[in-house]
Amino acid sequence: MRKDGIDAWRKLIKHRECGIAWRAQQIVGDVSPDAPVDRRRHALGRAGSWLGSLPPRLSLEQEDAVKIIAERCGYSTEAAQRAFRAKFFRDVMPISEESPAQQLIATSTASRRAASATPLQRDRLLVDQVSELSVGDGLG
């Protein structure tokens, strides 16, 4: 910068890359679309675990990274987004009191136990009930 001045800075900024996308590429860098399915899914799992640990305020960066990961692993963006939402981005759609899952719990045996439970215990019961409804995570 001292040598080339502001032009060097502008050139650097013009070719910048998002750190989230860069890290996602690093995580799945050893995988290609023609790799065996288990390797591709393991790479998706590694990347998803990391992306899922990021705060929700980075959701746009996460979405861009999922597109990159999907392409690198040979999956459609839509399928990867869906799988990541189901397994790693569970906080994207918080369960409200009016949700079907909440209604199910209200009528289940767990709701009777929940009546005397603490709020944290009720939340855990809710997660357990929803988990029982899931049909696999699709990531192996």
Image: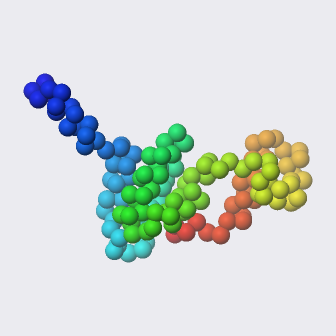
Residue visible at 61% across and 69% down in the picture: 136
Residue visible at 88% across and 58% down in the picture: 107
Residue 110 visible here: no
**Quarter where residue 6 is shown:** top left
- Is residue 67 shown left or right of residue 31? right
Quarter of the picture containing the N terminus is top left
**So how many labels did they put on this image?**
0
- Is residue 33 shown left or right of residue 82? left
Considering every residue shown, the one lying at the far left of the view is 3
Q: Please tell me which residue lies in front, 124 or 25.
A: 25
Residue visible at 42% across and 63% down in the picture: 70
Q: Please tell me which residue lies in front, 138 or 115.
A: 138
Could you say where residue 28 lies in the image, as x and y percent from the top left?
36, 59
Could you say where residue 130 lies in the image, as x and y percent from the top left?
72, 59
Residue visible at 9% across and 27% down in the picture: 3
Considering every residue shown, the one lying at the far top of the view is 2
Could you say where residue 89 lies in the image, as x and y percent from the top left?
57, 52
Residue 5 visible here: yes
Could you say where residue 109 lies in the image, as x and y percent from the top left?
87, 59
Q: How is the image coloured?
A: rainbow
